[in-house]
Image: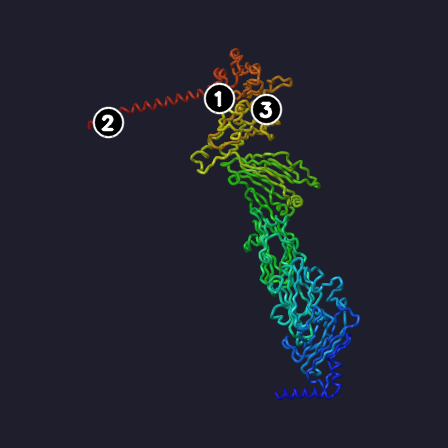
Amino acid sequence: GGSGSGGGGGGGGGGGGGGGEGGRSSDISRDHCNKTVDIFEDISSPEVSNQNVGRPLTCWYRFRTLKGAPRDFVLRLRFKKFKVGQLLNATHCDGGYLQIVDGNAKTDVSNRREPGMFCGEAEQPQTFISETSYVKVLFHTDNFTDQTYFTFDSRAEQQTEVYLRYGQHPELYPNRRGEYRDCRLQTCYVQSPAYPGLYPRALNCRYKLHTRQPYIKLYLQNEQFAVDGQRCENVMTCPIRPIGSGNEHCPYDWLAVYDGRDEHSPLIGKFCGLGKFPFSIIGTSQYMYVEFVTSPAGPLLNTGFHFNVGNWPGHVETAGIKHGVCDWLLSSDSLKDSSASEGIFLSIAHWYPPNTSCSYHIKGHVGEIVRLYFPSFRINRIESPILKYEGDCGESLTIYDSDHADPARIIKTFCDTFSRPMEKVDFVSTSPSLYVQFDSKTGSYSGSSLYYWAHYDFFNNTRFGDPVPNTLCDEVMYAWKHPGGRLRSPLNSLIFKRTGGSDVRCQYKFVTDRRLYARAIIEVNAVSFKELPYNSNACTRCHEERVDKLVIWEERDKYQNNLACFCDNIPRAVRVISSADQMNLEMIVQGQHAITSYFKNPNPLFEATYEFAHGPLCGPITLGPSPDGELVFPFKKALAMVAGPMAPPEHHYRREKCIWELKVAAQRDLWLNLEKARFADRSCESAKIEVYLAGRLEPRFVVCPENISLARDLPILTTAELGATGADQEPLPVLIQYTGDGQPGRNIFRLVWTELFHLPRNPDGSLSASLLQDGDCDFRCPGDTEVCIPRHLLCNGVPNCPNVTHTSTLSQLTRHIEWNLEQLGLLHHAGEYRQLVLHDESPEICLRRDLSELPYGKLALIALGVCLMVALLFAILRRMCRRSPKHQGSHHLQEDY
């Protein structure tokens, strides 16, 4: 206390002594302190003298405005040397300070109320550039000695000279500083006050930023970031602090960035340090809030920051529903509503905190599959982590063949440390959902280290049958699961892209069980393969040429038996019927143009229908060849399967379709006769019998309840109509099809056939007897049909000659009577039958046939057999009669005893 009091007295005496010196002290103070100085004048601290040494000293300096200078000039103060006071805890100046007051009550900006304090030591020149043309410098020390000093000079500069602050062309951007709404490229900047000079102390600056498009971006180009990077000039004592973030790292001066409109928005980071700002800061929207705070006291160091404001240019609108910050539901409905063929989503381009997980659930409808591919994909090291991570896979992208993150259904995982990007590779789901998840352990200020541009779309993967495992598009139609329906080329056009240039082959196999059906039927309605102008292969030999085609075949004796081939448009529907219980349809597309011609082509390459036919009630599928025969529906042996005790209780009667192949011998005509028929309804919808000739699309004739009377006079099918090409070659079979009610007993019919031999003719039209073969032409049918039948078909109970009485004259009906009687040995009756029409079942023939035709050999054997049976019976009776008295005698003996 004594020392303090003495010091005070000494100070007072010194002051008095100074006053006693007369005008000398006042001259020194007036020359070096408390004055208005000219711009461009060098200013230094007062000299140490007996009057001021060891005493408190305060000096202020104002700058005189130049005559004729523009009003918007600023002052550049360059401190050449500076040592004032001591900085304690980077918050308080001990022993002295320097204040720079920028602006006054008339200027737009001013820190005159809280100018803050600079203190410490700076041996290297430091520059302060004012915001206004009114500047006041205040120097104070508690104990003025030769270890307290400062030296600075000044000069006035216009805005064009301070281009780091106002830009190269300030006249083009008058609101470049402070206009932070609707920022566009090269228009908005966020700077520390007095930039590029030293920033003032005791600041609390707020910047509300807004861009027209997301995502708002804060970045440095070539400028250095210097916020509390040095706390003294001596790097040994005060090492340079690298750029960092957080309250512990930045307790004094800091720049805080918020992801939103104000300080209540999520904090992205609180930054300070010295160096090149290593990353951009990207927000999640169009808004960002920045706060710059400096401590009340600090060193005469650190120049602040200069950030550009813009937006990340790669933003696209994602068609989907967003949950939270980065979880998306991308549905096929949302994509359809957007009228886009493919959906797009990008890697995370904005900041996100550590341990972030973002998901994209790509969801289609039932029957759809999802394709995902990356037109652009780059994998970089993590350049802007919020949290350091030294292990592998700090960030990863995983694709799941599922609707959630199922570890058992991972398709592919990409990591930032060891994965290679896969561009333009299709990742395809097996279900309607694909799940993509991005995980980051580190977080990021400026987006993911996995940069990708992802496209997705949906494909209809509906099948008409059962898919064959491990095939691209093969299907099986089982009769017991898919008894009939529609068929077309795959709805999923993605198959044309997945063969890698190989031919695209889709096989449809039709399989039945003879207990259900015996045939498969395919009706091809349309074929629409594209015509390629550069393709030299014409559709002339469909099976052999390398063209796009549709092949129908069946396996017979382990060989492929081709039934039909289509490689061009067809004018009308074509029906193909199997000859057994299996048939195959195969679509083949040439691989070299499959993608360009058919990928995402909505039009079907072919359209067809199929069904299974010929159930057990139909009986055998093949009839003939034989001189005569019958077709009976329903097949008696199969009735127990559908109506008897062996029938399953849940059996329901279906509409039946029967297809019989009737084979005809070479050089024979065919006559069909519906001998018996009983139909439950009178409509042709309930029952219909159609007869098709080979190669004909329309039936030769149709029989149904409405025209049943005409069925007894069906025309003869000649050898030429049947399609025979050679004398010894059998014609193609005749197809007889029945379609109607399958309930037993409702529809019954008996269709008989006869193979007729056509009478050969000479060139002049007369009959050629030399061409008649033995046993082929024993009876000539009446009328003008000119056909005959063998002898064994006479009088067999079935009419085998066509009934032509209503179409032939009497002379035509009777002209073969004598020849027929001669062949039958009844010529002596010719007179009696001259005016009769004799057919193969006429009583006149059947009752008077010559007995020489009887099978005497067979009759003799029958008679001999009968005689042997009678003799055997007589011998048995005789033996029984001999044994009977003996038994009777023994009986009397027993009674006497």
Within 10 Å of the Cα at label 2, are there few (<14), some (14-19), or many (20+) other Cα atoms? few
Which numbered mark, 2 or 3, is in the foreground of this view? Answer: 3
Q: Position of residue 74 (x, y in %)?
A: 74, 70
Residues under numbered marks 2 and 1 in contact, where contact means CB atoms less than 8 Å apart:
no
Label 2: element kind: helix
Q: Position of residue 405 (x, y in %)?
A: 55, 55
Disc 3 residue type?
A: Thr
Where, by quadrant of the figure, is residue 234 drawn?
Answer: bottom right
Residue tagged by mark 3? 718
- Indicate left or right for 617 with 868 as reference: right
Disc 1 residue type?
A: Gly
Residue tagged by mark 2? 891
Q: Is residue 52 above or below residue 808?
A: below
Q: Is residue 730 above or below residue 348?
A: above
**Residue 878 seen in the figure:** yes
The quadrant of the picture occupied by the C terminus is top left
User: Could you tell me how far apart the alpha carbons at marks 3 and 1 are, in whole angstroms?
Assistant: 24 Å
Residue tagged by mark 1? 797
Q: Is residue 93 above or below residue 276?
A: below
